Amino acid sequence: MIAPATESTAAEPSTDARAFADDRAFAEIEDLAERCASYWRSVAEAAFRREPVAMAVPLRQARLVTREVVEIAATIFAEGADGGEGGGS
């Protein structure tokens, strides 16, 4: 007879799995940060040309990318607080 699964036998992510997830999260943050920098460059160029309408789309994109980065970073920080290897200084 197979014993029923309990919380104590539930599989926890391995240290390697957590490290892999952190690596992916940091790579995603890096990519998004580079995109955001590009959006801000577009905002700066439109501001230089005094074209507020041209600023609207890259501002919206920068806002959305920033939100995504904050959500990813919050996950990393939360894992660090729970004893994972991510986050913390």
Image (spheres, helix red, strand yellow):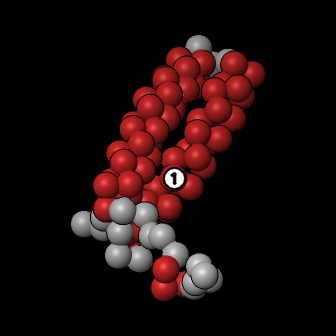
Q: Give whichever of 21, 2 is nearer the camera.
A: 2
Residue 83 falls left or right of residue 52: left
Q: Amino acid at mark 1?
A: Ile
Q: Is residue 36 above or below residue 69?
A: above
Nearer to the camera, 39 or 1: 1
Residue 69 appearing in the image:
yes
Q: Which residue is mark 1?
A: 72
- Residue in front for this viewpoint, 89 or 22: 22
Identity of the residue drawn at 65% across and 32% down: 61
In the image, taking residue 88 as reference, residue 45 lies left or right, namely right
The residue drawn where x is 44% and y is 46% is 25
Quadrant in the picture for residue 89: bottom left
Residue 29 location (% of width, % of height): 44, 42
Residue 68 is situated, as x and y percent measured from the top left of the image, at 58, 46
For the point 52% across and 47% down, the residue is: 69
Q: Residue furthest front?
A: 1
Tell me residue 53's x, y (percent).
Answer: 74, 22
- Dot 1: few (<14), some (14–19), or many (≥20) neighbours within 10 Å? some
Residue farthest along the left direction in this orientation: 89
Q: In this view of the protein, can residue 22 be seen by the observer? A: no
Residue at the extreme top of the image, as rendered: 49
Judged left or right of residue 81, residue 41 is right
Q: Quadrant of the N terminus?
A: bottom right
Kindly state the secondary structure of the residue where label 1 is placed: helix
Q: Residue at x 41, y 77 (%)?
A: 82
Instruction: Locate residue 17: give its quadrant.
Output: bottom left
Residue lying farthest to the right in this orientation? 53
Residue 13 point in image, percent of width and height: 43, 64
